[in-house]
Image (cartoon, helix red, strand yellow):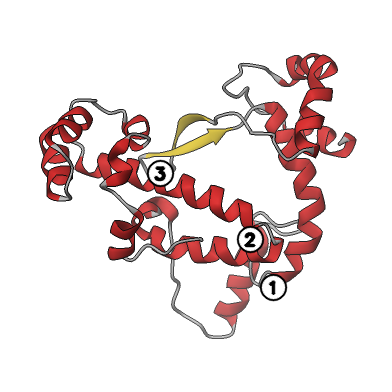
Amino acid sequence: MVAAWKHVKANKGSAGVDGLTIEQTIEHLRTHWSPIRAELLSETYRPQAVRRVEIPKPGGGTRELGIATVTDRLIQQALLQVLQPLIDPTFSEFNYGFRPGRSAHDAVRQAQRYAQEGFRIVVDLDLEKFCGAIAGIPAGMEAYFRLAQTPQVFRDLDSWLRHRLRAIQLKHWRRGRTIYRGLRRLGATHELAALVAGAGNRWWHCSLSDIHRVLTVSYFDSIGIPRLT
């Protein structure tokens, strides 16, 4: 934990949803670390929500960035220090992103070597359309969590993904009238469809309602999104 704290402190960064800076978190943990540690050991700890901010992209537009609380960043770093030596060796030698001892500069140098070898085609991929390609993501998560042997994580993550997918579907429909028609078409009652349609942009809040009886696991099966459990 000492090494993790040094890393988090060196990275600096903004406060999360709790509003506590790095300096304030130090004082907070002096009196609150014992119960947090007990929750971690009993596997009942739950991280706080992530503060979402938008940052400009060099090519225009914005990218959504999630800022965890300093406490959660500390815990994440401690876990990373244990898991990374176990998982990193399983990655391809040509993966350069967010890996120890590797950087974007290494990727550029490798690309230069490919060019010198005569290759002339470059494929540039952006995760901007992540949600549109989400069908391929759960399989990768499944492979990781099988490695970690944590079946409960499968169940919790799958439940969260269903909430997220319902919120994405509502946001995709966006307009109240479209939401109403979409839910009615899938079998929702007039009362439920009207309630959700009239809730404005509260996509996540509405995804926790009874629409799980309409936007079911089977519905997402039908559009090709795999399950984790």
Judged by depth in the image, the label closer to the viewer, 1 or 2, is: 2
Task: Give the residue at x 15% y 45%.
Answer: 182
Q: Which mark is residue 189?
A: none
Q: Which mark is residue 145?
A: 2
Left or right, 9 with reference to 191: right
Q: Indicate whether 143 appears above or below 192.
A: below
Q: Which mark is residue 93?
A: 1
Residue indicated by mark 3? 164
Please tell me whether mark 1 sits on a helix, a strand or a loop.
loop
Please tell me whether mark 3 sits on a helix, a strand or a loop.
helix
Left or right, 112 with reference to 101: left
Within-10-Å neighbours for mark 3: few <14, some 14–19, many 20+: some
Which percent across, then down, holds residue 38? Answer: 81, 31
Distance from the alpha carbon under mark 1 to that under mark 2: 21 Å
Q: Residue furthest bottom?
A: 118
Task: Give the residue at x 73% y 40%.
Answer: 43
Q: Nearer the viewer, residue 10 or 36?
A: 36
- Could you tell me the amino acid type at mark 1? Glu
Quarter holding residue 71: top right
Left or right, 63 with reference to 2: left
- Could you tell me the amino acid type at mark 2? Phe
- Could you tell me the amino acid type at mark 3? Arg
Q: Nearer the viewer, residue 111 or 61?
A: 61
Please tell me whether mark 2 sits on a helix, a strand or a loop.
helix
Which percent across, then down, holds residue 15? Answer: 63, 22
